[in-house]
């Protein structure tokens, strides 16, 4: 076929929308049983910090009133409806095992057979493997450990002392939720600015969009500044600390049995640890030389040096909005234009031959 899209989340579906408007043959592969399952697996109380009107993919408004903050299940249903509305060719329960280069394009080996395509877009997001520091192995076996990407609800942790390691929007939301039922300490590696969900009666993300901060190019001065100081939206941990709902502490640096050692030498006893420490690249199946020493993609705005191979939904791929549901469509349209231009060049070459 002309185009193979690996990943049937918001990025792959947005790209599929643009592909169906051309004459190129394409297929979307996804490992899950249903479109939207990657959202359904996230923690139960997850609510987007972007309002419904900022979560549209190309061609289909998000089905909620303006000002509503969708839950993760509402997002999953929207994505499933999006694929159905535009009759996108999504092949589910298909695990990609290997992608390699061939003279005429690419071969993708999957759990359901092999596919060949002239161009391939990896729209899985790239960073899917939970990162946990190596010293976590030194904690006792009866200390419950869970990565933030695997956390579901407070009842999944035993009662007692919980240490939340790391921050970010998910980490902050989970810590605030756990503080209702557990004794929570947050070990913060660095300070992050905090913005309220609403400011002067307006959604703060809407204000940032209107100020063109969310759309600031990655390489711009504003983009570089935002990347270094990406704010937490809507969850003020310091305010919770002042109200004695949780405690803020320094960076976690080591562990031994039931104790985690914080920067400065402070020990803290724990019953559970939630690691909000980010995700690593998990692209071992990619047998094409486009990964750096950390196994992360080498690309420029999603375009690699290997002709016909692209990435989509990488953090900061083109702007801060690249990681947001409502903005991934812009990146998808940009990659779609590259794909179409390359396909047109190949078609002209074949006709001249």
Image (tube, rainbow, N blue to C red):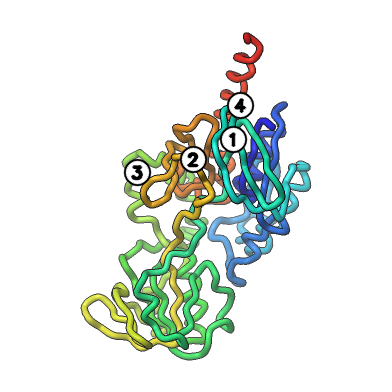
Mark 4 neighbour density, 10 Å: few (under 14) some (14–19) many (20 or more): some
Mark 1 or mark 3, earlier in chain: 1
Mark 4 touches mark 1? (CB < 8 Å)? no
Q: CA distance from mark 1 to mark 2?
A: 10 Å
| Mark 4 or mark 1, earlier in chain | 1
Residue drawn at x 59%, y 37% is 120
In the picture, measured across the screen, residue 344 lies left or right of residue 27, that is left
Q: CA distance from mark 2 to mark 4?
A: 22 Å
Label 1 SS: strand
Give the secondary structure at mark 3.
helix
Quick check: marks 2 and 3 in contact, CB under 8 Å? no
**Answer yes or no: do the residues labelled 1 and 2 have beta carbons within 8 Å?**
yes
Whole-number angstrom distance, CA of label 4 to CA of label 1? 17 Å
Q: CA distance from mark 1 to mark 3?
A: 38 Å
Q: Quadrant of residue 343?
A: top right
Taking the view exactly as shown, the residue that stands out farthest to the left is 264
Q: Badge 3: few (under 14), some or many (20 or more) residues near its Cα, within 10 Å?
A: some
**Label 1 neighbour load within 10 Å: few <14, some 14-19, many 20+:** many
The residue wearing badge 3 is 222
Mark 4 vs mark 3: in front: 4
The answer for how far apart the CA atoms under marks 2 and 3 are is 33 Å
- Which mark is on residue 340? 4
Residue that badge 1 annotates:
106
Between discs 1 and 2, the one toward the N terminus? 1
């Amino acid at each position: 076929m002309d185009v193979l899209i690996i990943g049937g989340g918001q990025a792959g579906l947005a790209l599929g929308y643009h592909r169906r408007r051309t004459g190129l043959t394409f297929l979307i592969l996804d490992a899950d049983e249903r479109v939207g399952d990657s959202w359904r697996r996230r923690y139960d109380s997850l609510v987007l910090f972007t309002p419904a009107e900022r979560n549209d993919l190309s061609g289909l408004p998000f089905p909620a009133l303006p000002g509503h903050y969708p839950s993760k299940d509402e997002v999953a249903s929207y994505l499933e409806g999006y694929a159905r509305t535009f009759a996108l060719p999504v092949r589910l329960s298909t695990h990609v095992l290997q992608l390699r280069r061939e003279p005429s394009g690419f071969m993708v080996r999957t759990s359901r057979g092999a596919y060949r395509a002239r161009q391939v877009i990896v729209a899985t997001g790239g960073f899917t493997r939970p990162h946990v520091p190596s010293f976590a192995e030194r904690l006792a076996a009866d200390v419950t450990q869970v990565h933030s990407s695997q956390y579901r609800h407070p009842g999944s942790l035993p009662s007692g002392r919980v240490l939340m390691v790391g921050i970010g929007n998910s980490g902050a939301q989970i810590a605030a939720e756990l503080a209702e039922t557990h004794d929570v300490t947050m070990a913060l590696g660095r300070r992050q600015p905090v913005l309220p969900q609403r400011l002067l009666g307006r959604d703060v993300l809407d204000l940032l969009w209107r100020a063109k901060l969310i759309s600031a190019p990655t390489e711009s001065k504003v983009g570089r500044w935002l990347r270094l100081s990406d704010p937490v939206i809507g969850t003020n941990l310091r305010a919770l600390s002042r109200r004695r709902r949780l405690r803020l502490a320094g960076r976690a640096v080591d562990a031994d049995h039931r104790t985690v050692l914080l920067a400065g030498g402070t020990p803290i006893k724990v019953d559970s640890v939630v690691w909000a420490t980010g995700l690593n690249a998990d692209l071992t199946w990619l047998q094409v030389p486009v990964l750096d020493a950390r196994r992360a993609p080498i690309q420029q705005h999603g375009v690699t040096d290997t002709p016909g191979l692209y990435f989509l939904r990488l953090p900061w791929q083109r702007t801060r909005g690249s990681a947001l549901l409502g903005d991934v469509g812009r990146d998808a349209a940009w990659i779609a234009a590259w794909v179409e231009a390359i396909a047109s060049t190949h078609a002209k070459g074949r006709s001249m031959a």
